Image (cartoon, coloured by chain):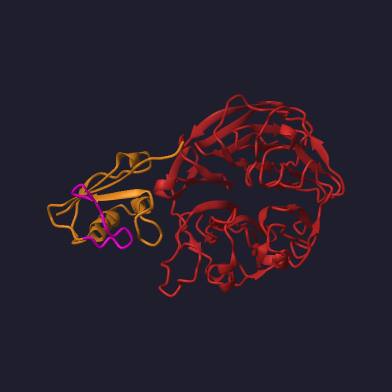
Chain colours: A red, B orange
Amino acid sequence: MADRIYVGTRKGLFEIARQKKGAWAIADVHFLGDPVSALLSTDGALYAALDLGHFGTHLWKREGNAWRELGVPTYPPKPDDATDDPHPWSLGKIWALEPGFVSGRLWAGTMPGGLFRSDDAGESWKLVEALWMMPERKQWMGVAGGEQPGISAVLIDPRKPDEIRIGVSTAGVWVSHDAGKSWRIMNRGGMYNEYMPPERREDPIAMDIHRLARCAAHPEVVWCQHHNGVFRSDDSGLNWSEVTAIKPSKFGFTVAAHPHDRNTAWFVPAIKDEKRVPVDGKVVVARTRDGGKSFDVLHNGLPQRHAYDLVLRHALDVAADGATLAFGSTSGGVWISEDGGDNWTAPEGRLPPINAVRFAA
Amino acid sequence: MPTVAFTRALERFLQAPPADVGGATVGEALGAVFASRPTLRGYVLDDQGGLRRHVALYVNGKPVRDRARLSDPVAASDRIYVFQALTGG
């Protein structure tokens, strides 16, 4: 049973603990006042990426009760002849932090689009240069049109840890089969991007991948919450089909995949994309249990009147039991379910805007 | 030797006491500080070695001119002050 949740917010890291069945409470606060952009709980350690703005991005690790600062991903010197690169060679923020399923290995997906690897449990980081130096990377587009591109998801197959897939907002899905030495774009067909010019709408590199999630027991099943809707792949991200049954709307940022059941996934839809608030002011979770053919709209315990909570890419998580879920919103709401989403409870408190929610591993 | 002092806002994250250091430019003086406090570098400079966008650096009360390469000359009696104006809600 999952009993601890880490919540990264614009004003600190909050630790939520299970008191008893259906009752959760804020148990601790760390880095109060500092923006936390990404979290990872693995191998008994907790990693927190702080996005300090004025003072840059920094990575901290907790082992036992002690926090200490680690090395941070750093981009190499920009060559003088790289003037046609539209993106900065400087760390914006750490957006995705994932375990590598090899002792000591971690992956960090960042803005402006660099993937970094650590082989010493986060002490030091190396840019995956083969990805960063690809000529195609210059075509990657910034999130929301003007900002930097960001790696929003890093998927590692625990059985084949050298096989890496990344989802980029906005540049589609990329894969490496050799631990990052070579890369190719992966999504061949099935996705489309409505906001692009007509001739580019089905271009694989034009896909705005808000978030990817894969079924841990069936890693070939990958779900995507895309800017334009929900897509599902049964071949590890090569071919995609749109999941049109999603309701109450197809726009959203996040997705969580059931760790064992290939047909179950959860989404938190919102009104597309110029408004970005829940449909009818009701916070709901959409759950499919039949591979996307149909959805339940779950709302027991969630606010259903004048609620304008938006749930960002990394702010929904499902625990290893496949039944305990948690998500957090840009309005600071946190909701937890112990029964797969049928019923939700909220810990007491009003949190800052939430970037990331992760169960303790 | 130039003196380098840092805003107290950094004390939340790490130690950054004032230091008397060598160096003929702002960049060399900062480099001398970071040689003994390597973690501090990333709080002040970006990945390309320029001042972070919202970090200010003054020499004897005047803003540094070269924020990218930190080439402004400094003399032994100069005072370098690194700070920032906190913004946002």
Q: Where is residue A81 in the image (x, y as percent from the top left)?
A: 43, 75
As drawn, A311 above or below A151: above
The residue that appears at 69% across and 33% down in the rendered structure is A336
As drawn, A204 above or below A290: below
Was residue A58 drawn as part of the magenta stretch in this picture? no
Q: Where is residue A151 in the image (x, y as percent from the top left)?
A: 59, 57
Report whether A358 appears left or right of A279.
left
Magenta stretch bounds: B59-72
As drawn, A146 above or below A82: above
The secondary structure that dominates the magenta segment is loop
Question: Which one is in front, A346 or A99?
Answer: A346
Corner quadrant of residue A199: bottom right
Corner quadrant of residue A198: bottom right
The residue that appears at 55% across and 60% down in the rendered structure is A113
The residue that appears at 75% across and 65% down in the rendered structure is A238
Q: Position of residue B46 (x, y in %)?
A: 39, 57
Report whether A178 appears left or right of A245.
left
Report whether B28 appears left or right of A143.
left
Q: Position of residue A213 (x, y in %)?
A: 71, 52
Question: Which one is in front, A41 or A127?
Answer: A127
Question: Which one is in front, A352 or A257?
Answer: A352
Was residue B63 drawn as part of the magenta stretch in this picture? yes
